[in-house]
Image (spheres, rainbow, N blue to C red):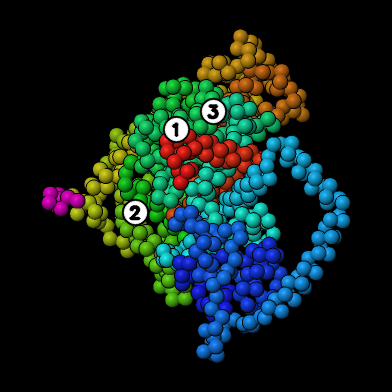
Amino acid sequence: MPNFCAAPNCTRKSTQSDLAFFRFPRDPERCQKWVENCRRADLEDKTPDQLNKHYRLCAQHFEDSMICRSSPYRTVLRENAIPTIFDLTSHLGNPGRRRKRIKELSEEEIRSLKERKLDAVVPEQENHQSNNDGDIQIVEIDQNEESLGMTTEEKEHKDYIRSLFEIVLLMGKQNVSLEGRTCKVPEDVYTPDNFQALLEYRINSGDDVLRRRFEMLAVNQQYCSELQQQQILIICESCIREDVLKDVWNSQFFSIVAEDAIDMAGVEHAPIFLRYLDDAYSLREEFVGFFPCEADAEVLAADLLSTLTDKWALNMEYCRGQSYVVSSKLSSKMKVVGSHLQQKFPQATCTLSSSCALNIWLAKSTPVSSVSVALGILEDVYLFFKNSPALLEDLRSTITTLFEDNAEKGSELKEILNSEWTSRHDTFDVVVTLIHSFILCLDKAASDPVLDGKISSRAFILSSALTDFDFLVTVVILKNALSFTRAFGKNLQGFTSDVFSAANSLTAVLHALNEVMENNEVYHEFWFEEATTLAAKLEIPVKIPGRFRRMHFANFPHDLTPETFYREALSVPTVQHVIQGLKDIFSEEHLKSLKCLSLVPSVMGQLKFSANEEHNTDLYKCDLPNPDTLTAELHCWRVKWKHRGKDVDLPTNIFDSLQMPDIKFFPNVQALLKVLCVLPVIKSESEKFETSRRRLRYYLENTPADQRSCHLAFLNVNFDAKHDLDLMVDTYVKMEENKNKVDSNSPGSDMVQEV
C-alpha cells in the first residue's frame, strides 16, 4: 500500500516518487512539534502512537541538514529532526483543492495546546513513579544486565536481532517467501517485501525495540538488507540442524538417503535424509539439508563427504548404508559418489530405499530419453488431477463408464487414484489400463469453455503428450520389461519374511531377465504388437519419433520400421539397464545384510530354526560388543524361540524384536538388529517415519521453483524441531563483532574513521 504525505497541499505518495517517507515520532514532545509545524487541525487530537502508525511526511519537508544519507539504500533522519518546509498558502488561490483539512493556528492556540498536552502527561508520569513494584522490576533487570557486563545499547541491539530472528523463523515455518513478489515491479516504484511488511506489523503492534530502531528510518527504505536476511537464515538452519543431528550422533549407526535433484531457484539440489534409531528404538528419517549436485561426479563425491564430515560432523565410520533415489540425469553421478564412499568406508553399503518401489527406481535411472520424458508426463498428469478435485471426480465418472462391464475392475482403479499411483510397483500397468480414461477426460477439459484458460491449456498439452505414440510404446515396453521384477520389488517393501525371501530369489529374477535379453526379438514383437493395438484403439498413428527423423535427415534409413527402431532404441537398452541395475544395487554385501534378517524370530520359525545366521553376520562383526560369544548367543537365541510357550507369538519384524524386554541378555543380537534396521532398504511400519519426506513434498508442490529457498525449505520441513533462540542471537552478535574487528584491523581503516 502506498504511503501518502500528511503535509498540507502535498500530494506526493511513495509509489510515484523516489523520495523517502518518514513516520511521525512516538516521542510526545517531538511528535507535537511535527503536528504544530504541519498546521493540520485534524491531527491535534491524535495520539503519538496513532500518528506513528498511520501518518508520514516526505523528505521534501525537511532541511537537508536534518537528513542523513549514509548510502544509496539507507536514508534516515537525525534524532532531533523537525519538519520546517511547508506550503500553507497555495490552497488560497485554488479553494477547490483541499485534500486535507487545514487550519492555521495562532501563537496563543499553540501555547494552549502545549499546556493541555502537558497536563495530560504529568499525571501519567506520577502514576508510573508511584508503582513501586514496577520500579523494583526495572531495577532488577538493570542490575542483571550490569552483572552481565552489557550496556543498555548492547541489550537493545540484541533484542533487535532477536526480533529479526523471530520473524525469519515464523516465515520459514509458515512457508512465507521473504521477497513475496509474484510479479515484476518497476525499479522506480517502491514495494515492501514480506519481511519488511512483518517488521512494520510488529512495530505497529507495539514492539518498542523495533520502533526505536526504525522510527527515524525512511519507511520506503529497506529495513534489513538481503545479505543480513541470508545470514540470519543460515544461522537458523545451522542451529536447528545441530539439534536434529544430536539424536543422530547419540544413536551411533546411521544411513544416508539422497532424493532426486530439485530446482531451487535455478540451481539443482538433492535433499539429504539421515536414517537412524532413536533411544526408544523407533526408526527415524530426518531431513538435514540440500546438497548442490551440478558438479561432475568426482567433485560431487568429495563435496558430499566434506559436507557430511566437516559441516555436519558425522562420523562416517558408523555409516552402515547409503541410497540414492535419483533420475537418469543424476544416477550415473551418484553411482560414482556411492562407490567412492564405499571404498573409503566399506560398511556403508549401497542399497535400495524403502521409500521408492524397485520398478520406479529402475525406470528413473534408465538412461533412455523417452523413458525420462514419459515419467515427467506421468507426474504432470498426476498433479493435474490431484490439484483439481472436480476434474478428478470427472475422471472417476469416465472410468465408471468405460468399465461398465467390469464394475469390480473400475472400483479398483478408482481406489488406486486415491493413492500416489506414480510410485507403485505396477504404475505402468495402471497407466496402460487408464490411458483411455485420461485422454477422454483431458480432451473434455481442454474444450470446456467454463474452465479457467490455464487449466484448459494444460489439459490440451497433456492430452497431446499422451496421444503421442512414442509415449504409448514407452509405457507399454516398461510395463512388460519390469513385469519380471514386480513381485520381487513388492516383496522388498513387504513384511520382513518377504524381504528375506526376496534376497534369496534374486538369482531366479536375473535368470528370467537374461532369457528375455537373449530372445529380445521375440519378446519385443509381442510388446510392440500390444502397443500398436492400443494405438489403433485410441486412433494414434504409429510412427518413428519426429526428433529422430530430424536428427538423421541426411542419412535416414528408409527401410527402418517403427518396430525395429523401438527394439534397438528402447527395448534392448531398457532390459540391459534393468539387469545391470539389479546387479549394481544388490551387491554381495547388500544380499548378506538382507539374509541377516533370519535373526528375526518369525523368519527363524519359517526356516524351522535351522538357518546358520553366523555366516552372514561377518559383515558386522566389528559392531558386536562380544564377537567371541556370538556363536553361543545365536544358539541360545534360536532355542529361546523354538521352545517358547504356546501363548508367545513370534516377533514379526526387527522393531518388535528390539522391544522385547529380555533383548538386553542378547547384546550381539541386539547390536545386529540395530544395524540392520537403519539400512535404507528396510521398511518401517510407523507413519511418523515418512513425516519429513511428506513435508518436503508439500513444500515443493506449493512453492514455485523461482521462490524456493534451501534455507526456508529446511525451516519449513523441520518446523517442529527445537531451537535455541538465544544461541542463534548470540551466534549472530558474535559474527558481527568478529566482522567489525576484521574491518577495523584492515588496511586504511584508520583513515576511513578519520574521514
How far apart in space, not on screen, are marks 2 and 1 (Cα)? 36 Å
Horizontal and vertical percent position of residue 126: 84, 60
Towards the viewer: 455 or 574? 455
Q: Residue 108 at x, y = what percent? A: 71, 79
Q: Residue at x 65, y 69 (%)?
A: 33
Horizontal relation, residue 435 to residue 654: left or right? left
Instruction: Report how far apart the C-alphas of labels 2 and 3 lie in the structure.
Output: 44 Å
What's the residue type where badge 1 is placed? Leu
Residue type at mark 2: give it. Answer: Phe
Dot 3 crowding, Cα within 10 Å, few <14, some 14–19, many 20+: some
Q: Which residues are magenta?
A: 551-557
Q: What's the distance in space between the residues labelled 1 and 3, CA to CA?
A: 12 Å
* Amino acid identity at mark 3: Leu
Of labels 2 and 1, the one closer to you: 1
Q: Nearer the viewer, residue 679 or 51?
A: 51
Report the disc number at residue 314: 3
Q: Are marks 1 and 3 in contact (CB under 8 Å)?
A: no
Which secondary structure, mark 2?
Answer: helix
- Residue that badge 1 annotates: 304
Q: Quadrant of residue 253?
A: top right
- Judged from the image, the secondary structure of the residue bearing numbered disc 3 is loop
Q: Is residue 56 left or right of residue 528?
A: right
> Could you tell me residue 25's position as x and y percent?
64, 64
Query: Which is nearer the N-term, disc 2 or disc 3?
Result: 3
Q: Residue at x 19, y 51 (%)?
A: 551
- Disc 2 marks which residue? 471
